[in-house]
Image (cartoon, grey):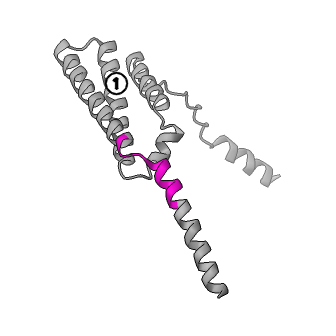
Amino acid sequence: MAIASFAVGLLAFQAPLPAPRQPQALSTTPQAAKAFGAAMLAALLTMAPVDEAFAAGRSGGRTLIRENQRQAYLQQQLRTQQELGRDQAEIAMLQRALAEQNAKIEGLKSQQSGSDSGGDDVSRLKEQLRRQEDEIRSLQRN
């Protein structure tokens, strides 16, 4: 009986359980959410297609991809500033930077396509390799 009364006494001295925590609301503004959503959309829309990924292995391909990424960033910044209604001088500066970036990318693309006679070079080199392999085989037979 003494053990039972001791256990009842322990229960009487226990502290009450703390109240469960309420989830806290995030303190973001709709404008911040829009800007984040616009940035994510811009990132998804500017993912490098297969032909640019192939060009990345070439000498100027990485530069082209880097410039495309900068162009996407400038476009996203311009859209964000226009949505937020920032001052017109900043928007005009971003528009000029975007126009310069577009010109730079076009120059890189034309430079790459001008030096890109890759199809002819590859077929010519394959033919040369085939002839050399035939010559090696004929020398090994003799």
Q: Residues within 10 Å of mark 1 (few under 14, many from 20)?
A: some
Q: Identify the residue at image location x=42%, y=16%.
A: 30
Residue bounds of the magenta highlight? 114-125
Three-letter code for the amino acid on which mark 1 is drawn: Gln
Placement of the C terminus among the 4 image quadrants? bottom right
Q: Which residue is mark 1?
A: 75
List x then y, in percent, for residue 44. 49, 31
The residue most toward the right is 1
Pick the front one: 58 or 83: 58
Image quadrant in which you'd find residue 100: top left
Q: Is residue 75 left or right of residue 86?
A: right
Secondary-structure class at tag 1 = helix
Residue 6 is a magenta residue:
no
Q: Residue at x 57, y 35 (%)?
A: 18
As for residue 116 lying within the magenta part, the answer is yes
Between 126 and 3, which is closer to the camera in this rendering?
126
| Residue 104: percent from left, percent from top | 27, 34
Q: Where in the figure is residue 1, as x and y percent of width and height?
A: 83, 52
Please state if 10 lies on the left or on the right of 97 as rendered.
right
Report whether 106 appears left or right of 133.
Answer: left
